[in-house]
Amino acid sequence: MGIGIIGIGKHVPEKVLTNLDLEKIMDTSDEWIRTRTGIEERRIAADDVDTSDMAFIAAQNAIADAGLTSEDIDLILVATVTPDQPFPTVSCMLQEKLGCSNAAAMDLSAACAGFMYGIITAKQFIETGAYRNILVVGAEKLSKITDWNDRNTAVLFGDGAGAVVIGSVSEGRGILSFELGADGTGGKFLYQDEYIMMNGREVFKFAVRKMGDSSVNVIEKAGLTKEDVDFLIPHQANIRIMESSRQRLELPEEKMSKTIQKYGNTSSASIPLSLFDELEARKIKDDDIIVMVGFGGGLTWGAIAIKWGK
Ligand code: UT7
């Protein structure tokens, strides 16, 4: 049997904040944001909605999509840098809200690469036979740690949640290879003080290098070549970084997921949100080879090659 994604769900807040809205509150322009980042609008959660609320809806949908019930979930992993509070964790809050009475629960912190770390952690537990079905959620309310007086960061981020269930799939399908990595020496380039602090240029250079390298590495580890890749789902941080990964894999434009224009950078939620939307748009079909790749604060990175289908 393979180990893969057997269900998916998402949730984004209703409130849309456009570049034009931002023009009114800070010294920026729609033109600058579009051309430098690819972002047109982002979703912002209401004051009384926190990360766990968005995670809950996404998770509920993922469990239903997998054809499972809450009791079938053995472990809940929530990747987030914006938990409701340090503890109890978002995963424990979900365990209660979802009624996953048989599940262990923990949060996992690897910033924007968190979803990749979550998927790969889940894979290990299933591979050893310890667990069968694992809920992996990427959920962020970044608006609560955004400095709305800092145009360098405020235009980039958005709120949202994506969730998948990892379980058994047919032989030959599922996760084929992975790479995870970290470089703590770059921690100073992207961190949270009270708000998100970032050296954009340094993070940009790191991202271009690591997104490209780790995408190529997972393809090679899976015994495949660039020509075998059907679709790329990169972390949605900046269209120029995403484009460089696409070019590294020599893929045409239509074979890369692009949701940054509508959600901005949602950190750990960006890859599952993109996956959800591409499945809905029927751009991914069974047996497609997909590369998912992310990077983030830490600095961290992670990638997988996966053969789609149950
Ligand atoms: O998930 C990981 C999260 N982080 C990232 O992925 C960030 C990676 N880095 C980036 O995406 C880019 O570096 C940014 C989008 C953050 C910035 O783009 P850039 O092309 O590297 O611009 P820059 O920082 O070199 O700034 C160019 C100019 C500066 O003005 P001067 O010094 O040339 O006069 C900035 O002050 O653009 C100015 N600027 C802005 N102008 C209008 C910076 N932010 C804005 C803004 N609106 N929002």
Image (cartoon, rainbow, N blue to C red):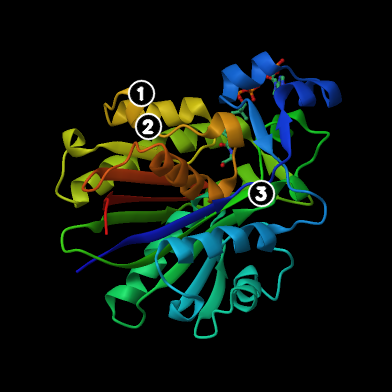
Q: Residue under circle 1?
A: 253
- In which quadrant of the rendered view does residue 242 lie? top left
Disc 1 packing (10 Å; few <14; some 14–19; many ≥20): few
Disc assigned to residue 191: 3
- What amino acid is labelled 2 in the image? Met
User: Where is the N terminus found, in terms of image quarters?
Assistant: bottom left
Q: Which mark is residue 122?
A: none
Tell me whether the residue at label 3 lies in contact with that at label 2, contact meaning CB atoms closer than 8 angstroms.
no
Please tell me which of labels 3 and 2 falls first in the chain: 3
Q: Are marks 2 and 1 in contact (CB under 8 Å)?
A: yes
Determine if the C-beta at disc 1 is less than 8 A from ligand 1.
no
Indicate the quadrant where residue 247 lies: top left
Total labels: the figure holds 3
Residue 33 is situated, as x and y percent measured from the top left of the image, at 65, 22
Residue at image point 35% right, 29% down: 246
Check disc 3 and report its element: helix, strand or loop: strand
Which residue is depicted at the point 61% across and 42% down? Answer: 189
Report the front residue among 11 and 213: 11
Q: Relative to 84, is 299 above or below?
A: above
Question: Which quadrant does the C terminus fall into?
Answer: bottom left
Query: Mark 2 — residue?
Result: 256
Mark 2, secondary structure of its residue: loop
Left or right: residue 181 versus residue 109 is left
